[in-house]
C-alpha cells in the first residue's frame, strides 16, 4: 500500500540533499512542487482518522524558532531542556496522542533544513557560559525514529553531538526502527528513549507502533552496542490489574537492558488537554482510556484525581525500586510535585 496519497515539496528545498535522499528512499514518487507548505497544510480541517488512508506528506523548510526551550518537568530537573522540530505529525496512531487536538490535520510534514536546526543548537551551546549539560529533545511533534530510515538526518546530528559533549540528545520513539541508528557510534551524550507499556496496553492503545517484543529487541540491540537508553512509562492508563502487568514489564526490560545502559526512567499518568480529550471521545468512543473518571486539574489538563495519580506514580516507583532500579534514575513527568 502506498503510504502517502499525495506528496508536496517546497520549491526552495527541492534541490537540498536531504530532500533528494528522502524522495529517493520513497522510491522517487510523483510529487507536486509548492511555494509554502503552511499555505496548504492544515488550512482546511482534516479529520484525524483520515491518517489511516488519506495521508499527505509535505517536505518543507521549518521557519521561525527551530529549537525551543522546553517546559518545566520536561526532563531531569536542574538542567536546561530544549526541543527541536524536525517533523509535524506521526505515522502511528496512539489513541491518547496529543497531536489529535494540536494541528488541524494529521498530514505529515518533514522538515529538511537540518543544517539550520543544528546551527541554532550550536548558537545555544556557544552562548551558554556554563559547563552544565543542555538537553535537546527530538520528537515533540512526531516519533523520532519512525521514519528515520527514509529521512536520513541522524548522521549530521551525530556530528554536532560529537563536537559538543555537554549537549545531550534525546530521541524518543515507540518504533523498532533502529536500522539507521545502529550504523552510528554510541555517543555517551545521546539517549535513545523508548516509551513503554505492557503488551496489552500497546495492543489496545498504541495502534501501528512496534509491539512490546520489537521494542525490547531494539533496546537489547542498542544496549549491546553501548547506547544509553531512556525509558518513559508514560502514559500509564489505570486498570485493576495494571500493577501486575507493569511488574512483569519491568522484569522483562531488565532481562535485556543492563542497568549501566539505563540513563533514566520517567513515569507519567495519562492526561489530556481539553481539546485532545474531546478528540479522543470522538475518535475512540469505546476506548478503555475513557473508563476511569477524569477531572480538570491544576494546569487545566484533564487527569485522574490527584490522590489516584499520586498513588499510581508512587506504586510504580516502588515496583521499580523493588527490581533494583536506582531511585535517582526515576522521575515523575509533568506532575505538579
Ligand atoms: S508515537 Fe507519539 S507522536 Fe506518534 S501517534 Fe503515538 S503518541 Fe503520537
Image (cartoon, rainbow, N blue to C red):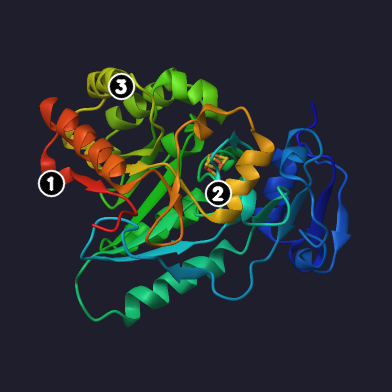
Q: Earlier in the sequence, mark 3 or mark 1?
A: 3
**Cβ of disc 2 within 8 Å of ligand 1?**
yes
Q: SS of the residue at dot 1?
A: helix
Circle 3 residue = 249
User: How busy is the neighbourhood of tag 2: few (under 14 within 10 Å), some, or many (20 plus)?
Assistant: some
What's the mark number on residue 98?
A: 2
Mark 2 or 3: the one toward you: 2
- Choose between 265 and 176: the one closer to the eye: 265
As drawn, 243 above or below 194 = above
Q: Are marks 1 and 2 in contact (CB under 8 Å)?
A: no
Residue 123 left/right relative to 166: right
Q: Residue at x 38, y 76 (%)?
A: 124
Residue nearer the viewer, 200 or 285: 285
Q: Is residue 152 visible?
A: no
Q: Image height check: is 292 above or below 246?
A: below
User: In which quadrant will I find the N terminus?
Assistant: top right
Q: Position of residue 47 (x, y in %)?
A: 77, 46
* 58 in relation to 201, above or below: below
Q: CA distance from mark 2 to mark 3?
A: 24 Å
Q: Quadrant of residue 317?
A: top left
| Percent coordinates x, y for residue 225 in the rendering | 30, 32
Q: Earlier in the sequence, mark 1 or mark 2?
A: 2
* In the image, residue 312 above or below residue 100: above
Q: Label 3: how many residues lie within 10 Å, few (<14), some (14-19) or many (20+)?
A: some
Numbered disc total? 3
Amino acid at each position: 500500500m502506498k503510504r502517502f496519497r499525495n506528496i508536496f515539496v517546497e520549491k526552495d528545498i527541492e534541490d537540498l540533499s536531504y530532500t533528494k535522499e528522502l524522495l529517493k528512499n520513497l522510491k522517487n514518487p510523483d510529487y507536486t512542487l509548492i511555494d509554502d507548505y503552511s499555505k496548504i497544510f492544515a488550512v482546511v480541517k482534516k479529520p484525524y482518522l483520515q491518517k489511516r488512508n488519506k495521508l499527505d506528506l509535505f517536505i518543507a523548510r521549518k521557519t521561525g524558532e527551530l529549537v525551543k526551550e522546553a517546559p518545566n518537568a520536561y526532563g531531569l530537573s536542574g538542567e536546561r531542556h530544549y526541543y527541536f522540530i524536525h517533523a509535524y505529525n506521526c505515522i502511528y496512531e496512539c489513541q491518547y496522542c496529543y497531536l489529535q487536538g494540536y494541528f488541524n490535520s494529521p498530514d505529515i510534514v518533514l522538515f529538511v533544513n537540518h543544517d539550520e536546526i543544528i546551527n541554532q543548537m550550536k548558537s545555544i551551546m556557544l552562548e551558554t557560559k556554563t559547563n552544565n549539560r543542555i538537553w535537546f529533545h527530538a520528537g515533540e511533534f512526531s516519533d523520532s525514529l519512525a521514519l528515520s530510515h527514509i529521512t536520513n538526518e541522524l548522521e549530521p546530528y551525530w556530528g554536532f553531538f560529537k563536537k559538543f559533549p555537554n549537549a545531550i540528545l534525546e530521541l524518543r520513539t515507540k518504533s523498532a526502527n533502529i536500522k539507521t541508528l545502529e550504523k552510528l557510534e554510541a555517543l555517551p551524550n545521546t539517549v535513545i528513549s523508548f516509551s513503554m507499556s505492557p503488551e496489552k496496553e500497546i495492543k489496545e492503545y498504541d495502534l501501528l507502533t512496534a509491539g512490546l517484543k520489537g521494542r525490547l529487541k531494539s533496546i537489547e540491540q542498542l544496549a549491546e552496542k553501548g547506547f544509553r537508553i531512556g525509558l518513559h512509562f508514560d502514559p500509564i492508563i489505570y486498570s485493576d490489574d495494571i500493577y501486575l502487568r507493569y511488574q512483569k514489564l519491568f522484569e522483562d526490560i531488565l532481562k535485556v537492558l543492563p542497568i549501566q545502559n539505563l540513563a533514566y526512567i520517567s513515569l507519567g499518568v495519562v492526561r489530556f488537554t481539553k481539546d485532545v480529550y474531546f478528540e479522543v471521545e470522538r475518535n475512540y468512543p469505546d476506548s478503555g482510556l475513557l473508563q476511569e473518571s477524569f477531572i480538570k486539574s491544576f494546569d487545566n489538563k484533564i487527569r485522574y484525581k490527584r490522590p489516584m495519580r499520586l498513588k499510581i506514580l508512587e506504586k510504580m516507583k516502588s515496583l521499580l525500586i523493588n527490581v533494583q532500579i536506582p531511585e535517582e534514575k526515576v522521575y515523575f513527568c509533568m506532575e505538579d510535585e
